[in-house]
Image (cartoon, rainbow, N blue to C red):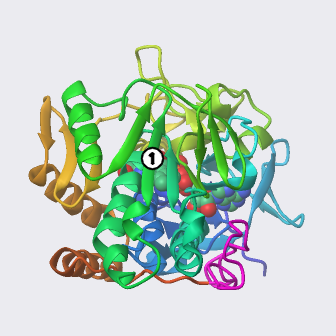
Amino acid sequence: MAVVNARTKVVIVGAGFGGLAAAQELKGAPVDITLIDRNNFHTFQPLLYQVATSGLNPADVAYPVRGIFQRQRNLQFRRATVDAVDWPAGEVVLSGGDRQAFDHLVVAAGATVNDFGIPGVAEHGFPLSVLPDAVRLRNHILGRFEVADVDPTVVDDGGLTFVVVGGGPTGVEVAGALAELIDKVLHRDFRGSRVDVRRAQVVLVEMTDDLLPPFHPRSRRYARSTLVRRGVAVRTGTSVAEVSATRIVLADGDEIPAHTLVWAAGVKANPVAAALGVPTGRGGRVAVQADLRLADHPEAFVVGDMAAIDDGSGGLLPGVAQVAIQGGRHVARLIERSVIGEGDIHEPFRYWDKGNMATIGRRSAVAELPHDLRLTGTLAWVSWLGLHLVYLMGFRNRVSVFVNWAWNYLTWDRGARLILGSGEGEATTPADPTVDDAPPPDVA
Ligand SMILES: Cc1cc2nc3c(=O)[nH]c(=O)nc-3n(C[C@H](O)[C@H](O)[C@H](O)COP(=O)(O)OP(=O)(O)OC[C@H]3O[C@@H](n4cnc5c(N)ncnc54)[C@H](O)[C@@H]3O)c2cc1C
């Protein structure tokens, strides 16, 4: 006799912050969940910049999804890429043509890099969005020093000039960590080399007049002056007009010889947003109702970076982890209530802003917490470290990150400064900044 499974089918697309939160919140619910992600791991994006600057290993900031849900009996993980949704059939369409049926759908596929169509950024820029980006950037940065070791004349051509574009938290964090890596670690590594590592430069370019736009002016001033004290050239009020492998042209006409452009200037919704075939708004984000449902498909919700969520004052909620986590939990609760017979609940999503943080480097950070509590310096830095350890997925990762940070703090050493992959920085290609930076297959 055939067994009929009448349990409600919930499909969650994306095992990022929003998708994981929704899946975990549904742990005890009488539903069958299929969690789909193109990767078999969750990435902790806030620490990607530490992988790129050799502070952490890739495995410290990623965690296998199957491991997270080993004990959650109502969830199956499926590694697949979602291409579209067939609304009439109630199915998610996967790459290769396979389909996954749903009664309720939660889409949390996140964001991707936005190069705003600026010529050369896609070809020559180094984005920092997914784990392979961080490894690729690390390869490239370390490779530049190996190239300069063989042929110090590349320094005159910008071989050791690292331009970071975007003065938000990611750009500030990359610039600060890069300056520290060069000053405290590579400076010692290359003692005796023909290249003078002190000639390396980090330039931070921000289009608006100040860094960290959402922060209080005092925090912004602190971030800027700390970066400058650590040797970063901060250029605000100008943007990037064009990029080649060795030159960055700014909108004010200046040209910076540089072989590295780190692109931390903007994101847009993941292409899955457009594939849903529903209205989208700024940055391609999906227009959602106050309860995060789609107007034309009330069985479906969009959360996190992909969703355009009204902040109540005419703007949109920011693309940060807390918005995704709280949104994921909210829609999970609505789904559970509907499954246990309360009907379709349209309770609006209310975001609890727990504050903003950005770190600039050792014992320097800015933290803005509820009730106008603003911290800078060591206290903010320690808060930043603690918070990131708490939110990091997996006990092993927490221990590993803690040990790495303690080691880095005590010794100024960064054990993860490895060039993985072939070609980067080898003596045969001393002046060629376009050598293959592809990460090895095991991290791609
Ligand atoms: C470098 C960097 C630093 C950041 N730092 C901070 C910070 O310090 N603090 C903070 O609050 N926020 C930070 N953010 C933002 C924060 O990471 C995002 O707001 C958050 O990850 C959004 O969660 P999400 O669930 O919407 O998407 P994500 O966490 O990005 O998850 C999306 C998931 O969907 C999967 N996916 C994508 N497309 C498909 C597809 N077609 N099929 C199947 N699966 C797919 C992806 O593999 C991914 O696992 C940072 C982001 C970046 C890039």
Q: Residue 234 appears at what percent x and percent y?
A: 39, 39
Amino acid carrying mark 1 in the image: Val
Between 276 and 27, the residue placed more toward the observer is 276
As drawn, the residue found furthest toward the right would be 97
Q: Is residue 423 visible?
A: yes
Between 29 and 71, the residue placed more toward the observer is 71
Query: Per the image, is 434 magenta?
Result: yes
Left or right: residue 131 compared with residue 372? right
Between 65 and 376, the residue placed more toward the observer is 376
- Report which quarter residue 378 is drawn in: bottom left
Image quarter in which the C terminus is found: bottom right
Query: What residue appears at the point 63 percent right and 26 percent down from the top-left corner?
Result: 282
Q: Residues within 10 Å of mark 1 (few under 14, many from 20)?
A: many
Q: Residue 362 appears at what percent x and percent y?
A: 21, 61
Query: Per the image, is 343 magenta?
Result: no
Q: Residue 174 appears at what percent x and percent y?
A: 41, 55
Left or right: residue 317 compared with residue 118? left
Number of marks present in the image shown: 1
Q: Main secondary structure of the magenta part?
A: loop
- The residue carrying mark 1 is 203
- Report which quarter residue 233 is drawn in: top left
Query: What residue appears at the point 43 percent right and 83 percent down from the top-left corner?
Result: 193
Span highlighted in magenta in the image: 421-444
Q: Is residue 430 above or below residue 121?
A: below
Which element type, helix, strand or loop, lies under badge 1?
strand
Q: Residue 15 appears at what percent x and percent y?
A: 55, 62
- Report which quarter residue 308 is drawn in: top right
Q: Is residue 8 visible?
A: no
Q: Is residue 182 above or below residue 66?
A: above
Query: What residue appears at the point 58 percent right and 33 percent down from the top-left corner?
Result: 254
Left or right: residue 143 compared with residue 174? right
Image quarter in which the N terminus is found: bottom right
